[in-house]
Amino acid sequence: MSNPQLEDGYTKIANELIEALFRIRLSGREYAIILCVIRKTYGFNKKEDWISYGKFEKFTGLTRSCVYRAIEGLVAKKLLVADKQLGQTIYSLNKRYLEWVVADKQLVADKLQGSCQSATQVVAYKQPTKETITKETIQKKRDVTTDADKMSAKKMLVALINQNQSFALLSNQSRESKVNSWAKDIEKLRRIDCMPTDKIDSVIEWLYSSTHKDAVFWRRNILSGNKLREHFARLIGSMESEPKKSFTRYFNPQIDGEPNN
């Protein structure tokens, strides 16, 4: 049985800051990241600290993609400061809580109370039957790729064709088939993994254009949409840790449009 004692260690933090934190509305994942940063900084009498994605995963139990999305959200809300230095990211809690871009819980509760009072209509739930669940409706649920998904998949194919002879030899029908297949994986990146389209495009461009050793390694192994999704969080980490410098572009989607055969 656990028996925590102050003598075994404690985290020193201002009451005013704690009170500001429990007045705001955050997701469970975001609260987990915030508590992890507090533990790794204030818990060691530090204002900031380098924390790897692996450490976030270990301390919070979240997957890497969830860690990434939570950090992105907290930085956007100005609760978390992420300072990239020499390929590492230094994290700290922004204690100036008046700068936070978040909703106050009491304010949200007051707004919801009025709308909930008028929402008294009960909607009956109709149990689906074998007659209502058809092959057509199932297919529609699966086939939800957008033009943006297909465009991202096309950019990926253009890059592969321009650097990989085996892809350059594909027939037009095979190319279209690959684009459609990869678009489904990219759609899952957006819908299930909550990755924005511009971030997906940035990773694809970096992956198949950068001369950095990490990009060179990954592009030898990322030859499908499924692999792109599987390693996406790692690709983001590698991309963001690369020093900013010019790199060779294998394609320019706005200019090329079509692969070079």
Image (cartoon, rainbow, N blue to C red):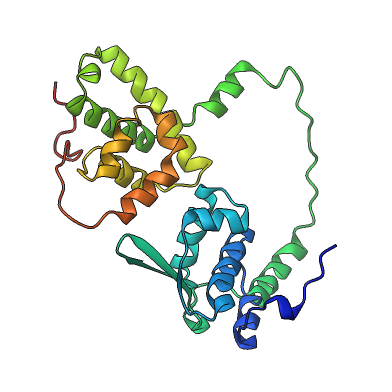
Quadrant (top left/top right/bottom left/bottom right) for the C terminus: top left
Could you say which quadrant of the image residue 29 lies in? bottom right
The relative height of residue 197 versus residue 13 in the rendered view (above or below) is: above
The residue furthest right is: 1
Q: Is residue 109 above or below residue 56?
A: below
Q: Position of residue 111 (x, y in %)?
A: 66, 71
Can you see residue 206?
Answer: no
Query: Residue 1 location in percent, x, y?
Result: 85, 62
Rendered position, 240 above or below 93: above
Q: Residue at left 50%, top 79%?
A: 46
**Relative to the observer, which residue lies in front, 108 or 41?**
41
Q: Looking at the rendering, which quadrant does residue 185 occupy?
A: top left
Answer yes or no: is residue 185 visible.
Answer: yes
Q: Residue at x 56, y 53 (%)?
A: 57
Give x and y (percent) for residue 152.
32, 36
**As drawn, is 208 to the left or to the right of 49?**
left
What residue do we see at 14% from left, 43% from top? Answer: 248
Q: Residue 178: name its quadrant.
A: top left
